[in-house]
Image: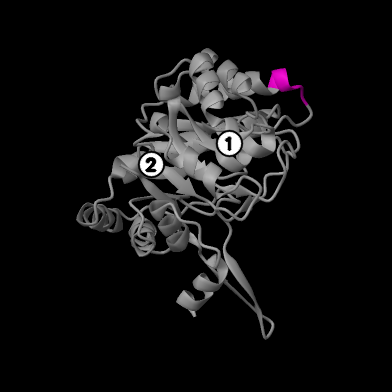
Amino acid sequence: MLIIGSHVGFKADQLLGSVKEAISYGANTFMFYTGAPQNTRRSELNDRLTIQALELMKDNNIDINNVICHAPYIVNPASNDSDKHEFAINFIKNELDRCDRLGVKNMVLHPGSAVNESREEAISNIIDTLNKVFESDNTCNILLETMAGKGNEMGITTEELKQVIDSVNHERLGVCIDTCHLNDAGYDLNEFDEYLSNFDKLIGIDKIKCVHVNDSKNVIASHKDRHENIGYGTIGFDTLLKVVYNTKLENIPKILETPYTGEDVNDETRIYPPYKFEIDMIRSKTFNNNLHSDIKKYYE
């Protein structure tokens, strides 16, 4: 079964609003942040809203086991700074607590960046962070995301992820692969089966628990990380379909993080989510040449 959704909001009505937004896109899963992705400020969870959200999910055939949380970008598990390192450990633990309370089973985490340190030191810090996080009694998994290699990002190769996973060696540690990041890191998605075979040999394909499906604005190995709408970037629609429908990744949630589309109208910027239309394209396996105009017509 195709399990597909997108990034959705988590605002005043929290998980309930996330579910409603996902349903409006025709999705059967979704990904959310429990607060803004750019900061670590978090509001108190409302259990009443969570219960309502879980009931609405059941009514609409959305399995909580397929829902993904994403940790904020600002947390750096690779940091060599003692205060930032300690903060990352404590914040990740708290975020896992929030996931457990919401009933979410998987949280995506960026491995972090090597700032004023070698890549070897950064890997050691990631390992230390995760080992200390897993000392807690949380039940939510952590999925390290494959990265594009922008700046000093860690986790840009399967080999780097293997180093971390082998040293942490915890059943709750997995991987989230991102198609844009893989392309920008230098992996040719036209050879995706070869990538998966190598991943299986080094890490084990069972560790892949989520796929971020994004086209890329950049040529392969650009190390820039700029997402594009499905079929409108350098990866292309047919190649992305082969990733989404790869039988080795069947029953793994596929999450869209593609950019909103829009324009400036009388000094007012109007932007709209593309996800309803991109999910339709993927389900029908038919590329929409009029994606942006169709989105505009629908929301206006």
Q: In this view, does 12 lie to the left or right of 201?
A: left
Q: Position of residue 214 (x, y in %)?
A: 56, 47
Residue at the image position 25 percent from the left and 52 percent from the top: 54
Where 59 sits versus 138, above or below? below
Location of residue 261 (image quadrant)? bottom right
In reply to whether residue 5 is colored magenta, the answer given is no
| Nearest to viewer (mark 1 / mark 2) | 1
Residue 213 image offset from top left, x and y in percent: 51, 45
Residue denoted by label 1: 110
- Identify the main secondary structure in magenta: helix
- Tell which of 13 and 56 is nearer to you: 56
Of residues 154 and 204, the one drawn nearer to the viewer in this rendering: 204
Residue 15, numbered circle: none
User: Does residue 272 appear in this view?
Assistant: yes
Q: Is residue 275 left or right of residue 189?
A: left
The type of residue carrying mark 1 is: His
The quadrant the N terminus occupies is top left
**For the point 33% across and 46% down, which residue is it?**
102
Going 29% across and 53% down the picture, which residue do you hit?
50
Q: Say which residue label 2 marks.
A: 99
Q: What residue type is labelled 2?
A: Cys
Q: Residues within 10 Å of mark 1 (few under 14, many from 20)?
A: many
Tag count in the figure?
2
Q: Position of residue 247 (x, y in %)?
A: 39, 32
Give yes or no for contact between labels 1 and 2 (Cβ–Cβ under 8 Å).
Answer: no
Q: Which residues lie in the magenta part?
A: 117-121
Helix, strand or loop under label 1: loop
Considering the numbered disc 2 on the image, is that residue within a helix, a strand or a loop?
Answer: helix
- Residue 171 appears left or right of 162: left
Does residue 221 sit above or below 55 in this rendering? above
Depth check: give the residue in front, 145 or 16.
145
First in sequence, mark 1 or 2: give its number: 2
